[in-house]
Amino acid sequence: MNTLKLLTLVKIYINTYICQALARYSSRSYCKGTGRVLLICIILVSMFSLSAQTPRKDSGADGLPSTKALNIGDKIPQFLWDTPLEVVNHPSGQKTIKLSEYRDKKLMILDFWATWCSACIAAMPRIKELEEKYQKDVTVIAVTRDEASKAQKFLTTNETIKGLGIYSVVADKLLRTVFPHQLIPHYVWISSDGLVGAITSSGQLTEGNIIHFLADKTAQIPVRELIDPERPLFLSDKMQLNDLSFFSVLTRDVVDGLPSGNRYRKENGVIRGRAITNSSMEFLFSSAARGILQAKGKQLLDKEIFVEVKDSSRFYPVKDRDILSNVFNYELVVPTEKADSLYQYMLADLNRYTSYRATLERRKIKCLALRKKGDLSLIRSKGGKRENTLPFNKPSKITNYPLSSLVSRLNDLDCFALPVIDETGFMDHVDLTFSGALASETLKSELNAQGLDLKEVTRTREVLVIRDK
């Protein structure tokens, strides 16, 4: 017997019991507790009646309309047009908007972004320019999963976009469910008749493609191809890796649908491969060098990479209105038993197939040595929650971290031209505070006040040198 039938029988039984109780109560032969019994029965009837209700066919488990993923050619459901969406920085001061407010436009573009996505931010001025040029027919709505306070602050303070007057849907769950994606920026093109006309990356959001869309020539807009970065980049679906597999591949130019960055190929916890996509030649060489040095217990700092080439125009990425060139894709997988030689193979590959040659060399170079100036026991950590907000907050703090974390952050700062190395010998975790100012002299002064000093020295370091062949 299923649950619904069982609940129905229980309901009939309780109703019968109530009727009998009412009959006895009317003859005044029933006990004084009858009133309480009747109340409990009525509540139970209500509970079982509610439990036996059949959910609406058009609703999800939470009672809201189902939100299936939409693809090119699908029609936007009415509930999606009518759902209020939380928004910040709206020019009219609105706290929510509905997509239906923009149905008078021939083209609505949903721009999925995040405060941490540099590519999203870099594309916004150009997209805003296009929106204003075609404002009669086009509207662009920014959408982020970031919370309202974070997005509001970013939109009004970021140097690239603060003057653009961009408003954004925030704390989004609905739209990213309807239009799922792995990479951002991500753009969904919707026509006035409610059809998904295109789904693209920023490279396809051009004036020419907008003109095609408005002329109802959506077939001419390239579709964003989604590539699973967890799979070997150029391995057929028909082939599978095994512990003997060995291959490498190197290509130039952007592969749309892949992120910029890198992944490790592992087998049983052993790193036997690297995949680096949409990245610079310098990043490829430095990744190989870092892997080699790490096996020796050493570190390669960004400021210990020396690019000594005559023409750097083909060495570094070039960005033309949000389109990247001079980026590369490289993958190497070695047999499992050769995993400890992975980075030597990688460096040999890059030296063999590119126009450059990179070597690890010992050189005497100038550095900034972090040294003890006062009593370091005064900065020994008191424990508690670990924080490292240098240089992102004003004021900044480093709480319950080793000095190596401070050195790492100092090496990331452009205000120090020389690499920073730790010569304090202090191994305990520390608590440090900073004003958040990023001037080198200010930081040195604040370190002095906490028993530390930065002193220019000459040291022999193993560095990476990249030359023309």
Image (cartoon, grey):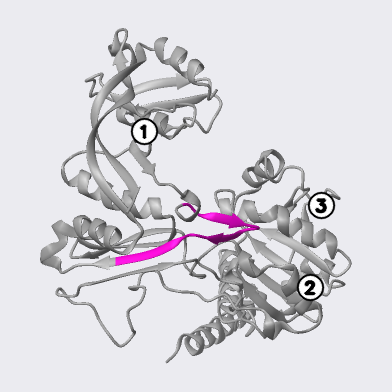
The residue sitting at the top extreme is 374
Q: How far separated are the C-alphas under marks 2 and 3?
A: 22 Å
Q: Name the magenta segment's main secondary structure.
A: strand
Q: Residue 166: x percent and y percent?
A: 75, 51
Q: How far separated are the C-alphas under marks 2 and 1?
A: 46 Å
The C terminus lies in which quarter of the figure? Answer: bottom left
Q: Residue at x 56, y 68 (%)?
A: 40
Q: Residue 56: x percent and y percent?
A: 64, 82
Magenta highlight range: 316-331
**Three-letter amino acid code of the residue under disc 1:** Ser
**Nearer-the-camera pick, 91 or 39:** 91
Circle 1 sits on which residue?
408
Verify CB contact (< 8 Å) between mark 2 and mark 3: no
196 left or right, relative to 52: right
Circle 2 sits on which residue?
107
Whether residue 328 appears in magenta in the rendering, the answer is: yes
69 left or right, relative to 162: left
**Three-letter amino acid code of the residue under disc 3:** Gln
Circle 3 sits on which residue?
94
Whether residue 19 appears in magenta in the rendering, the answer is: no
Q: Residue 186: x percent and y percent?
A: 60, 65
214 left or right, relative to 370: right
Q: Earlier in the sequence, mark 2 or mark 3?
A: 3
The N terminus lies in which quarter of the figure? Answer: bottom left
Verify CB contact (< 8 Å) between mark 1 and mark 3: no
Q: Earlier in the sequence, mark 1 or mark 3?
A: 3
Verify CB contact (< 8 Å) between mark 2 and mark 1: no
Q: Residue at x 25, y 24 (%)?
A: 459
Q: Is residue 402 visible?
A: no
